[in-house]
């Protein structure tokens, strides 16, 4: 203990730690009946850390390349001690992270936490969500199995439908005209270098913004607190909220461990570029609503190709969604109603199309 | 010392220096980025010998059967219809490029990815595919089934 104190004094003398820690001591978290939604961002961050750790472990044995990738994942799962568990945790945590990131985003919409002055916090969060989906898409191909091969073929083909730049984008993503070993090498590079770098940077920005503006309070609670300041309830971030967050992380870890152990992630069959797509092929659940929509759009709508129309529609919806805070200006009831309507519609659409996708043959 | 503390009274000479410096920096940044951007575009792969391929041997295919074979760098499908006729088509779905398959029960071609259907001539008959599959010519040469790309008229 004495050694620890001496180390702290040594650092304090040089860096004035007390001054650095001071703002954290002052940070508070509002307490109201919707406070539990504040945990979702933290849980997503925790899952990201799990992904970095398990990802590094997988890197010790994984070999990118069309002739080696599948075999190396097979090796991890069958020969390396606890390899199956590490890989299963990595896959499950990826899915849970997408889920908590989506849940976090929708909670921000419905609690209207994006409103002024937090527009940039929202934008950085949306970019993080896209990066998380990019992680999912690029990581999905790495085991080089049949499902992943066709999911990547379809996904990159969708990118290829974007007007004007589509074909260049497709060639850039695939590393050529077709999905081959070159695609795998590229996706590996994106997955383990480009995306982690960008994500870490953006997480820092996102956290700095959250720290700078403090936690948002839902508008009705804020109005009530303003009219009667005696009702304001807050807890200290450190240690009160932090310890609660730790508990949430511990529960998340428990859920993750249980899922990974009870339902280990399957590997499937090795991809064969010259075999037919098997029946029942479908993407990861978080792309299912888009997949199902593309399946249902007719080949031609007026004079536009169905898939081009679908991509343009999703692109436009995504853009409007990113700009949501700018529609909700203070004192404009119509903007607020539009956002709530859009939020309810988005959740219902994603939910309904996902279920439909799983039920439809 | 006059020019140091005022931006509004820049001499033309300073302005020229700024333009030269600025364009120099800009040119150097472009010269760093250009090779990187070119590096990102993969070199084209020569598609050799893709006009003719031996798809199968006589007897390998049964009535109402099919086989996926490699035609150049893309998959293609060879069919033997219920009447014993050979057909060869591109196996790349015109919707989103999945590889199609022959469904014996339906006696036509089906894409599992988005439920696209094509008839035995490759015509898109149901589901999202916007165009028919490219069809190839089939010749029997000895005991080999040879598939060739159709010549443009």
Image (cartoon, helix red, strand yellow):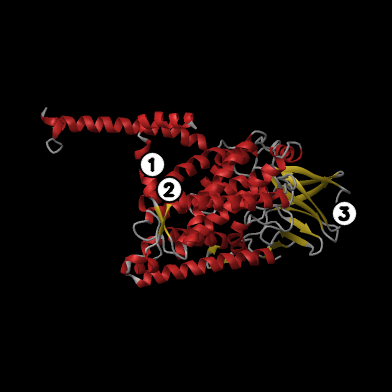
The residue pinned by badge 2 equals A207
**Image height of A143 relative to B113, above or below:** above
Chain letter, disc 2 residue: A
Question: Is the residue marked by circle 3 packed among few (<14), some (14-19), or many (20+) residues within 10 Å?
Answer: some
**Image height of A279 relative to A338, above or below:** above
Q: CA distance from mark 2 to mark 1?
A: 16 Å
Q: Residue furthest right?
A: B59
Q: Is residue A40 left or right of residue B153?
A: left
Quarter location, residue A177: top right
- Whichever of callouts 2 and 1 sits on the residue coming sooner in the sequence is 1
The residue pinned by badge 3 equals B62
Disc 3, SS: loop
Q: Residue at x 63, y 35 (%)?
A: A59
**Residue A166 visible in image:** no
Disc 1, SS: helix
Q: Is residue A325 left or right of residue B102?
A: left
Disc 2, SS: helix
- Of badges 2 and 1, the one in the foreground is 1
Question: Is the residue marked by circle 1 packed among few (<14), some (14-19), or many (20+) residues within 10 Å?
Answer: few
**Residue B68 visible in image:** yes
Q: Residue at x 37, y 69 (%)?
A: A335
Residue A315 pos. (x, y %): 49, 58
| Callout 2 and callout 3 share a chain | no
Q: Residue at x 55, y 68 (%)?
A: A348
Residue A350 pos. (x, y %): 56, 64
Residue B106 pos. (x, y %): 79, 64
- Of badges 3 and 1, the one in the foreground is 1
Q: CA distance from mark 3 to mark 1?
A: 77 Å
Q: Nearer the viewer, residue A160 or A11?
A: A11
Residue A176 pos. (x, y %): 59, 41
Q: Nearer the viewer, residue A204 or A345?
A: A204
The residue pinned by badge 1 equals A21
């Amino acid at each position: 203990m004495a050694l620890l104190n001496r180390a702290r004094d040594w650092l304090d003398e040089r860096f004035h730690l007390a001054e650095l820690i001071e703002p954290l001591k002052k940070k508070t978290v509002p307490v109201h009946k919707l406070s539990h939604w504040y945990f979702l961002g933290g849980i997503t961050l925790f899952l990201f850390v799990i992904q970095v750790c398990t990802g590094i472990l997988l890197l010790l044995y994984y070999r990118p390349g069309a002739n080696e990738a599948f075999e190396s994942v097979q090796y991890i799962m069958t020969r390396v001690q606890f390899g199956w568990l590490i890989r299963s945790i990595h896959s499950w945590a990826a899915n849970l992270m997408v889920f908590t990131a989506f849940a976090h985003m929708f909670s921000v919409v419905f609690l209207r936490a994006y409103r002024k002055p937090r527009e940039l916090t929202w934008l950085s969060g949306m970019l993080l969500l896209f990066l998380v989906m990019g992680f999912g898409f690029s990581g999905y191909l790495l085991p080089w199995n049949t499902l992943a091969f066709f999911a990547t073929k379809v996904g990159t083909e969708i990118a290829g439908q974007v007007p004007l730049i589509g074909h260049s984008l497709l060639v850039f993503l695939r590393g050529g005209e077709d999905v081959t070993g070159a695609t795998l090498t590229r996706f590996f590079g994106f997955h383990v270098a480009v995306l982690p770098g960008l994500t870490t940077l953006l997480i820092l920005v996102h956290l700095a913004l959250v720290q700078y503006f403090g936690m948002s309070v839902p508008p009705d609670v804020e109005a009530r607190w303003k009219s009667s300041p005696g009702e304001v309830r807050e807890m200290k971030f450190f240690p009160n909220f932090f310890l609660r967050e730790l508990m949430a992380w511990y529960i998340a870890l428990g859920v993750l461990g249980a899922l990974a152990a009870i339902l280990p992630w399957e590997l499937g069959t090795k991809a064969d570029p010259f075999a037919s797509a098997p029946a029942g092929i479908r993407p990861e659940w978080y792309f299912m609503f888009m997949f199902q929509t593309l399946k249902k759009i007719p080949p031609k709508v007026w004079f536009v190709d169905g898939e081009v129309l679908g991509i343009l529609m999703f692109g436009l919806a995504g853009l409007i969604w990113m700009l949501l805070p700018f529609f909700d200006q203070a004192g404009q009831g119509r903007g607020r109603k539009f956002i709530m309507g859009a939020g309810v519609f988005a959740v219902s659409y994603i939910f309904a199309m996902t279920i439909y996708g799983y039920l439809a043959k | 010392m006059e020019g140091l503390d005022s931006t509004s009274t820049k001499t033309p000479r300073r302005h020229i220096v700024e333009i030269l410096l600025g364009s120099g920096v800009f040119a150097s940044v472009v010269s760093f980025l250009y090779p990187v951007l070119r590096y990102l575009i993969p070199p084209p792969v020569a598609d050799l010998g893709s006009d003719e391929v031996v798809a199968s041997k006589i007897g390998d295919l049964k009535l109402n059967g099919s086989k996926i074979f490699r035609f150049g760098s893309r998959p293609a499908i060879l069919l033997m219809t219920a009447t014993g006729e050979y057909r060869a088509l591109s196996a790349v779905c015109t919707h989103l490029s999945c590889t199609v398959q022959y469904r014996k029960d339906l006696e036509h071609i089906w894409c599992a990815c988005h439920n696209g259907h094509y008839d035995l001539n490759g015509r898109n008959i149901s589901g999202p595919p916007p165009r028919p599959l490219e069809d190839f010519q089939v010749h029997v040469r000895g005991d080999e089934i040879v598939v060739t790309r159709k010549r443009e008229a």
